[in-house]
């Protein structure tokens, strides 16, 4: 198949309109016409024509075929501008709550990103956007090409940044596997395997009436952690429907634990999908007159600093949070440099402490 970037003169197959006579000079085809014929959006067509890496092989082939059939010749000046670099990348998060900067998970990811970028001499722009105004600012920045690439953190199913990511012609790396499976480049941790380890640990210590405090189910991490919990219980032919959902916060975990105790007072083991929620659950258990771990064993997920300061200390699933940020930034640098790395899944491991001893 001819490359529209390098091929010589080609015959143009676009039919003349009824108003165009045999000698009428045809108007040069546009990128919009290429996109329409290829069945893709203009932004996808542009990314494909500019050899951007975040375009699927099928769409890239469709655009190349359409460009060849129409005789489309890209503007060399525009292409040069599109492929230039400016020495800056963006980390965008759908959150503008000041408490975000006190969240140990986010702060560790940010440190990891910064460490990796130090070796690349790329500047980092942090953009927070939960409002429509903030999202519009991010979109303007990306469309202006005042950045070489973007990292997006743990997008929810209906997150507006999904649309921004789909529209940009820049390389995009996602922190956390997206639910829709569309992202080409992402870095995640083994959420399902880690949750399975947590449930298996509770089962191996003799607990049989297990419950779970899950995160929001419009996040892939929450879905995967529930699946891992259910996997372990299915092996033992035990029910996995004792589940309450919260928002990964301490208070959310405490409230969810209260609901679980009211509905299932015989619970003897709890897996919480974050350390913050596990710590909240332990407070609710104590308020309800339950001893940890004698009456109810508790396992969290993250291995944040709070896990070392609960009473008793929290058994948890450790994930490499700083490593997540480092790998995101490293992957983005590789993509900007013309490589096409594969997605990365980082390992998790069980850390046993007093809240759920062996």
Image (tube, rainbow, N blue to C red):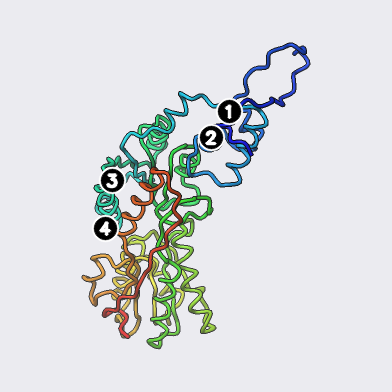
Q: Read off the residue under disc 1.
A: 31
- Of callouts 4 and 2, which one flags the residue occurring earlier in the amino acid sequence? 2
- Local crowd at mark 3 within 10 Å, few (<14), some, or many (≥20)? few
Secondary structure, mark 4, is: helix
**Mark 4 Cα shell of 10 Å, populated few (<14), some (14-19), many (≥20):** some
State if disc 2 and disc 4 touch (CB < 8 Å).
no
Which quarter of the figure is the C terminus placed in? bottom left
First-in-chain label (2 vs 3): 2
Residue 104, numbered label: 4
Lower sequence index among marks 4 and 3: 4
Residue 92 picture quarter: top left
Say whether marks 1 and 4 touch (CB < 8 Å). no
Return the disc, 3 or 1, that comes first in the chain's sequence: 1
Name the residue carrying label 2.
49
Q: CA distance from mark 3 to mark 1?
A: 34 Å
* Lower sequence index among marks 2 and 1: 1
The circle drawn on residue 120 is 3
Q: Which mark is residue 333?
A: none
| Element assignment for label 1 | helix
Cβ atoms under marks 2 and 1 closer than 8 Å: yes
Residue 33, x across and y down, in percent: 63, 28
Q: Residue furthest left?
A: 309
The front one of 297 and 182 is: 182
Q: CA distance from mark 2 to mark 1?
A: 9 Å
Structural crowding at the residue carrying mark 2, measured as other residues with C-alpha within 10 Å and reported as few (<14), some (14–19) or many (≥20): many
Q: Are marks 4 and 3 in contact (CB under 8 Å)?
A: no
Dot 2 falls on a residue whose secondary structure is: helix
Q: In front of the other: label 1 or label 4?
A: 1
Q: CA distance from mark 1 to mark 4?
A: 45 Å
Disc 3 and disc 1 in contact, CB within 8 angstroms:
no
């Amino acid at each position: 198949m001819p490359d529209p970037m390098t091929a010589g003169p080609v015959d143009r197959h676009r039919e003349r309109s009824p108003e165009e006579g045999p000698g009428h000079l045809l108007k040069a085809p546009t990128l919009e016409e290429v996109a329409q014929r290829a069945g893709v959006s203009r932004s996808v067509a542009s990314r494909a024509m500019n050899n951007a890496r975040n375009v699927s092989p099928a769409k890239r082939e469709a655009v190349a075929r359409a460009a060849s059939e129409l005789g489309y010749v890209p503007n060399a000046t525009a292409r040069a501008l599109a492929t230039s670099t400016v020495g800056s990348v963006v980390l965008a998060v759908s959150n503008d709550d000041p408490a975000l900067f006190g969240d140990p998970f986010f702060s560790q990811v940010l440190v990891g990103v910064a460490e990796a970028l130090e070796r690349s001499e790329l500047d980092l722009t942090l953009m927070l956007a939960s409002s429509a105004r903030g999202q519009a600012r991010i979109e303007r920045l990306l469309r202006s090409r005042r950045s070489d690439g973007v990292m997006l953190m743990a997008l929810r199913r209906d997150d507006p940044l999904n649309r921004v990511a789909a529209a940009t012609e820049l390389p995009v790396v996602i922190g956390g596997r997206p639910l829709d499976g569309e992202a080409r480049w992402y870095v995640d941790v083994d959420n399902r395997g880690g949750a399975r380890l947590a449930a298996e640990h509770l089962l191996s210590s003799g607990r049989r009436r297990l419950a779970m405090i899950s995160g929001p189910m419009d996040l892939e991490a929450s879905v995967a952690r529930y699946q891992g919990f259910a996997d372990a219980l299915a092996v033992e032919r035990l029910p996995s429907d004792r589940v309450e959902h919260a928002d990964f916060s301490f208070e959310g975990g405490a409230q969810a634990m209260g609901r679980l105790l009211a509905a299932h007072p015989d619970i003897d083991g709890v897996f919480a999908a974050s350390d913050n929620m596990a710590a909240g659950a332990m407070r609710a258990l104590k308020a309800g007159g339950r001893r940890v771990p004698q009456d109810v064993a508790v396992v969290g997920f993250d291995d944040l600093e709070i896990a070392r300061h609960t009473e008793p200390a929290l058994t948890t699933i450790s994930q490499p949070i700083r490593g997540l940020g480092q790998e995101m930034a490293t992957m983005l640098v590789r993509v900007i440099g013309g490589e096409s790395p594969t997605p990365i899944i980082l390992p998790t491991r069980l850390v046993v402490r007093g809240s759920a001893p062996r």
